[in-house]
Amino acid sequence: MAKPNPSLYSVEKTFIWFGVASIVLTVSLVLMVGQDYAREWKNWQRKFVRLKVEKTQAELKAAEEQLDQEKLKSLREEYEKTKKDFKAKKPEYRKLQKETHRLEVELVKARALQNDLKQYYDSYRYFLEEYQEEKEPQAAEYKKKLEEIAPQLEASQLAVEKIEKQKEEKEAQANELLAREEELQKETDRLTRDIQQLERALGQIKPDLVKALLNAPMLDFLRPTLQIQQVVVEDLYDDFHFAKVQKVDRCTTCHLGIDQKGFEDAPQPFRTHPKLELFVGSDSPHALEKFGCTVCHGGNGHSLSFKDTAHTPQNEEQEKTWEKKYHWHPLEKWALKMLPLNHAEASCAKCHRGVLDIPQAEKLNEGRRIAVEFGCTGCHKIEGFERAWKVGPNLEHAESKLTKEWIVRWLQDPKAFRPAARMPKIFHLSNTSSPEEKEKSFAAIEGVASYLLHHSKPFELTKVSEKGDPKEGERLVKEIGCLGCHSIGDFGVNHFAPNLSGLGSKTTADWIYTWLKNPKHYNPETQMPHLRLSNEEAADITRYLLTLKNEEWEKTVVSRAKPEVVDDMVLHFLRGKLRREEAQAELQKMDGEARLVYLGEKVIGNQGCFACHRIEGFQEAKPVGTELTNEGAKEVERLDFGFTEIERTRHAWFFQKLKEPRIFDHGRIRDYFEKLRMPQFDFTDEQAERLTTFLLSLTEDFVPLEMQKQLNLKEQEIEAGHWLVAKLNCQGCHLLEGTGGRVKELLQDPGLAPPPLDGEGAKVHEGWLYQFLKSPTEIRPWLKYRMPTFDFTNEELKTIVDYFHNAAKQEIVYDRVEKKPSSETIQAGKKLFEMFQCIKCHQPSEAPALGASFLAPDLTLSRERLKSQWIADWLKDPQTIQAGTMMPSFFPEGQSPAKDILEGDASKQIEAIRDYLLQYTPQEAASLGKK
Amino acid sequence: MIEGFKHLVNSVSSPVTVFTGALIVLSLMVFFPKQATNKWVAGGLLAFALIFFGIGLTDENFKKIVAAPDNVPIVAMIFIFGYFTWYALWKGVRNDERIAKGEPTLEGLETNEKVLVFPYLIFIEFVVALFYAIGLVVWSLLLKAPLEEPANPTISPNPSKAPWYFLGLQEMLVYFDPWIAGVLLPTFIILGLCAIPYIDTEPKASGYYCYKQRKFQIIIFLYGFWILWMLLIFMGTFMRGPNWNFFAPFEPWDVHKVVPLLNVNLSEFVFVKWLGWGLPKAWFIRELPGILLVIFYYVAPPALLAKTVLKKHYERLGVVQYNMYAVLLLTMLALPIKMYLRWGFNLKYIVAIPEFFFNI
């Protein structure tokens, strides 16, 4: 029998398996190290190094080309020559060096001697003092010693100085020999300084063996050149729901060129950040070191992989490219993904709170404006926007203004009546277009009309007694300032107030007349002021407005509500509270009109019409829309995408909702009153994009107060003013803060335009402005545009005055300090006044001889109205205060043309004119006129 | 054709079919072990499973669940335990044949063959350890641990699943009250496992694979392990989706799926549907039918069987051991019984005492 195998298995075969296992294990371990080592960001850094090397090399080449080769050559030649010459002098140099060395040794010895002597001196002096004090006999001995040693010390000091001087001389001589060489060297260096710098820089960044070793796997813990770059932001936090973690932004690991000028054309991710002086640059208000990146752009700053940082593609095309090139896919669960670049401005609102317009954030500001203009905050509560006004007209007295027929027609489709109507379409939209739903909509509309008229509070209209001339009315409308807010059809530049087209098909003469005379009588909360119209003027305008008809619309046929549909809908609501039998009984108790009114009430409550309109019975009702205070951070899972195929992102949902609000109902089976209710505003793509930016800005992100842009008291007062200016559309007529005053385009003569208001605070007295706004007076008689009477509250007046004066950096003072100028100053001023012929333009009469552009306000107003410092500044150089003004510069470059008055001193003359003006009364004017 | 296959699978998938199917497969395996462990049969089963997975992985929904790094080990576990079960049965069948012929068992043959631990055993172990290490390294290279972003307390994941070793219990929660499924039954599992050495004192058949000699115990074990443990974990991992709804293998996990739940307590069945009396107020009277039924279930079958079929075993084991056996076995059987009652009759609870938060 063969000897049994001691191992019971084939050891050789097992050895083979062992070999296989070892090799495979080694390979897999190498793969493991490799996988750990190979990071995305390292590749990007290597790419950037290549880019930078290329750039530096290009700069080097350019610098070398710029270099004056001739000069360099000549310098080098001279240097060589000098060196050769030096060779001859070398023995001398050596001798000098030897001497210097010897002198150094001498110096050391002399210094040592000096030190020793000093020691003795100090010691003897001490002992002498002691013994003298004690009156000991040794005092005399020490006195002698001291006297001996003092001159020795003196001598040694002199010796040291002498040797030092000798040494210096020798050294200077030696250096002299080398002087020329050094000089040449310095010059060469100066010439090649840039090139040397670039070469040094190149050496630092160019990859070489040492750097490769430092970056090698397993060795890269020492001092790698490929490193993670991060910005630890002190006061900003990432909200991880249960903890606030300090932000650590590692974006610059790949985005290496972002804070350096010169990479504007580089491929991403190396491109320089746009507007480096505003963002990211170290001198900018948003420095990279202080703010990081993710506070504005969102995303996961801690991560280092392209996908995990939650980069968001801007459009589908980019998404496809990313999917292909980088295997990108959206991060499923990271809530606050990076904002797409076109919505980056949404983050500005996090820190810039409490301001109407955020500087340089045009898209966001526009979005806000659109939201306030269309009354979004009426349905959707947004914290911080509570003071937004109701954007639709007051319907509490609807019966005095409208007929049922008109309301029913209007509600079918507002834009059919007036294409420029701001009211959105509420009925017959894409989710309520089936035949049954259409019938229901007809019934609902009629119900609403019935309710409004039934509950309309009585209102007495003033009857129009005058006949009125429509042509005159047209002229008035176009000339006295209505176009500051209104347009008529296509004519006009301002769309702040409702377009006036079709008004003749809408309401009655009496209503228009009553309204024009005093809008606040009909609606106390209206923004429309009155223009102090006389009865005649009001009648003219009324007649004219009544001629604006929309005849086509008047001819359209509108279906009436079917009684059984009305009954059904009423029953539906009654059954919300009662059982079917009782609901039927209740229904029978109501007559046709009562049913419609009941239905109207329920429909208004369901649809939330009171968001824009003040409606009787709904003054305190709560908004029906979703609260949007934190909409920018809303979890995407909470957004109902319905059966649409759009991207599952917040911004895609917002955009879609704004463009077609009812689309998420498609495919769903829902009762009429359970359907989505948001109206169709017909936003353009641009408006929807702006609004999306606005919505994305609504977050409750925690930003510590230190990092927010906080407004001081004056800035807050300015912001309060901004709000009123926006609410009352001052910029419809006036140029203020760089915008507005577009009515100028409608006027032939630019001098007929309302005056610009920038710097008004420095110009007029607070008290005067207060009074003027309260009750406007005539300043420029040739202006046909009238400053309206707004019926401000005292609070509002104060806000506006504070606004203008804070904006002009004035201390707000209501009292005036009257100075008493000397009589000769006044006389001089009068002379200058006559010399410069001020009255030629500053004419008090109503029928001027000059064109409007040349006319200027009556100077008798100056006393009450203008600030004395402003008058002086104005006279000195009008163009700096109001560029383009027709007021001449009488003192070009600070020089006066009148050399004989007040010694030709321009500033004294200005003061004299100013002082004269400040006591320029109508009597004075009259006396001058007589002359 | 593949689409047709997927549709077919989806349409027949339900908890009933999966459970019943598993019971049938297990029964076939334990009652026909020789045929079941036949290389061709087992190979065929394996091939079918692999083809199923292969086809399945082309489907997006299937892939999303099965290829998730968390679930890959569960898939691996099923295959591995399947292999070991087959191996044990196969060896058992072979040993049974040898014993029937009077030959020594395979283990008996090997007993006298010994190997030096060092170097021979160690060497093999070492090579195996190397392969094990390779497996771990390659696994770590290919399947990354799913590190998600920090938890959001306002959004619970849907479905919220327990770790795999508790998924069986989570599945049981569908059919049982949390007290039963979460406390009582796990306690029974642990106590039962501890009690095995004291109830299963059969001295025969130790040290070698066998089947006929320990048929009863093996069947109980395989039933307990595969049906009550592995199958429930399998269902909990792969077939339970958002809101713990049942989802077929190729069905997308839709959060909005709404399935009617119409289950009725036994007391309602008895007092409202059958007798028409209306539910009694006192819980004792109301739940009396259920309580009696449960008592009957635990008392009657053991007593009857002790007197008749299992008389021999009763005498051999003695009262205590026999009753312990009975209680444990009956509890093990209670699970499928309850499940079928639920599926067949929409039975919610046999005994429902919300006053004490106690339901069976």
Image (tube, rainbow, N blue to C red):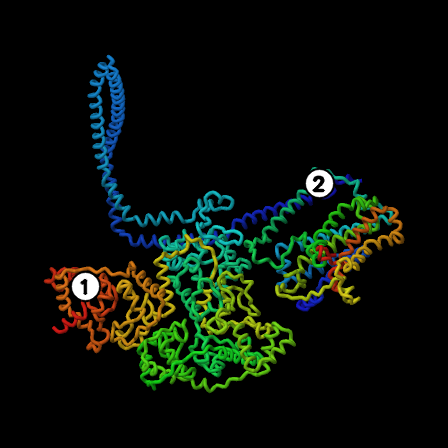
User: Closest to the observer: A24 or A457?
Assistant: A457
- Identity of the amino acid at label 1? Arg
Point out which mark residue A906 bears: none
Give residue A187's position: percent from left, percent from top.
25, 46
Mark 1 Cα within 10 Å, few/some/many (few <14, many 20+)? Answer: many
For residue A585, above or below residue A196: below
Res B283 visible: yes
Q: Residue furthest top?
A: A137
For residue B244, above or below residue A447: above
Res B21 visible: no
Point out which mark residue A914 bears: 1
User: Closest to the observer: A414 or A926?
Assistant: A926
- Identity of the amino acid at label 2? Leu
Q: Which residue is mark 2?
A: B121
Q: Quadrant of residue A423?
A: bottom left
Side of A60 relative to A216 (left or right): left
Which one is closest to the eye, mark 1 or mark 2? 1
Determine the CA span between mark 1 and mark 2: 114 Å
Secondary structure under badge 1? helix
Give residue A716's position: percent from left, percent from top.
37, 59
User: Closest to the observer: A413 or B325?
Assistant: A413
Side of A607 relative to B333 (left or right): left
Marks 1 & 2, CB-CB < 8 Å contact: no
**Quadrant containing the N terminus of chain A in the rendered view:** top right
| Chain to which mark 2 belongs | B
**Quadrant containing the C terminus of chain A in the rendered view:** bottom left
Who's the residue at 43% across and 49% down the image? A207
Give residue B96's position: percent from left, percent from top.
83, 50
